Image (spheres, helix red, strand yellow):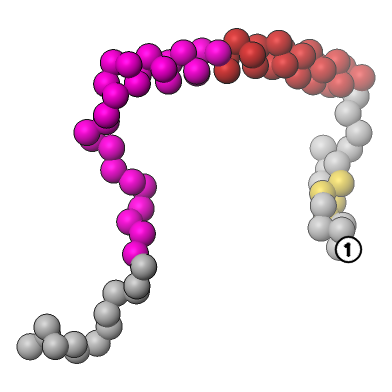
C-alpha cells in the first residue's frame, strides 16, 4: 500500500480496496452494527448495577484540578 500526502488537501491518498477487502470490511462493519445495541445495553446495565451497589464512589477524584486563578509567581509575602 502506498501513501502519498497531497500538498494542498492535507489528506492521505491510499490505494483502492480490492473486492475481497471490501467484503471483509462490510462484514466487520455489519457485525459491529449488529452488536452495538447489545453492547450499549450491557454498558447501561453495568452502570445502573454499579450505582445500586455503591451509590457514592469514595475513591473517585477528578482527573485534573481546576483553578480559577493561576498560581502566584515570584517572591510573594509568604516567601522569606
Residue 61 in magenta? yes
Residue 17's place in the image compared with 11, above or below, is above
Residue 18's place in the image compared with 58, above or below, is above
Q: Nearer the viewer, residue 33 or 69?
A: 69
Disc 1 crowd, CA 10 A, few/some/many (<14, 14-19, 20+): few
State which quadrant residue 25 falls in. top right
Farthest residue to the left: give it: 80
Residue 28 horizontal/vertical position (percent): 74, 16
What is the span of residues highlighted in magenta in the rendered image?
Answer: 41-67
State which quadrant residue 34 falls in. top right
Give the tally of numbered discs.
Answer: 1
Residue 28 visible here: no
Residue 68 horizontal/vertical position (percent): 36, 68
Is 41 left or right of 48, judged from the image as shown? right
Residue at the spot x=88%, y=63% of the render?
Answer: 8
* Quadrant occupied by the N terminus: top right
* Quadrant occupied by the C terminus: bottom left
Residue 72 visible here: yes
Residue 9 in magenta? no
Residue at the spot x=46%, y=13% of the render?
Answer: 45
Residue 79 horizontal/vertical position (percent): 12, 85
Residue at the spot x=28%, y=15% of the render?
Answer: 53
Q: Nearer the viewer, residue 66 or 79?
A: 66
Is 56 left or right of 15, judged from the image as shown? left
Disc 1 element: loop
Residue position for label 1? 8
Residue 57 horizontal/vertical position (percent): 27, 31
Amino acid at each position: 500500500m502506498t501513501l502519498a500526502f497531497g500538498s494542498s488537501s492535507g489528506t492521505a491518498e491510499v490505494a483502492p480496496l480490492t473486492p475481497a477487502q471490501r467484503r471483509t470490511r462490510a462484514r466487520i462493519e455489519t457485525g459491529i452494527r449488529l452488536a452495538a445495541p447489545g453492547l450499549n445495553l450491557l454498558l447501561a446495565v453495568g452502570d445502573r448495577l454499579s450505582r445500586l451497589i455503591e451509590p457514592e464512589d469514595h475513591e473517585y477524584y477528578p482527573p485534573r484540578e481546576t483553578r480559577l486563578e493561576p498560581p502566584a509567581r515570584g517572591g510573594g509575602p509568604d516567601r522569606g
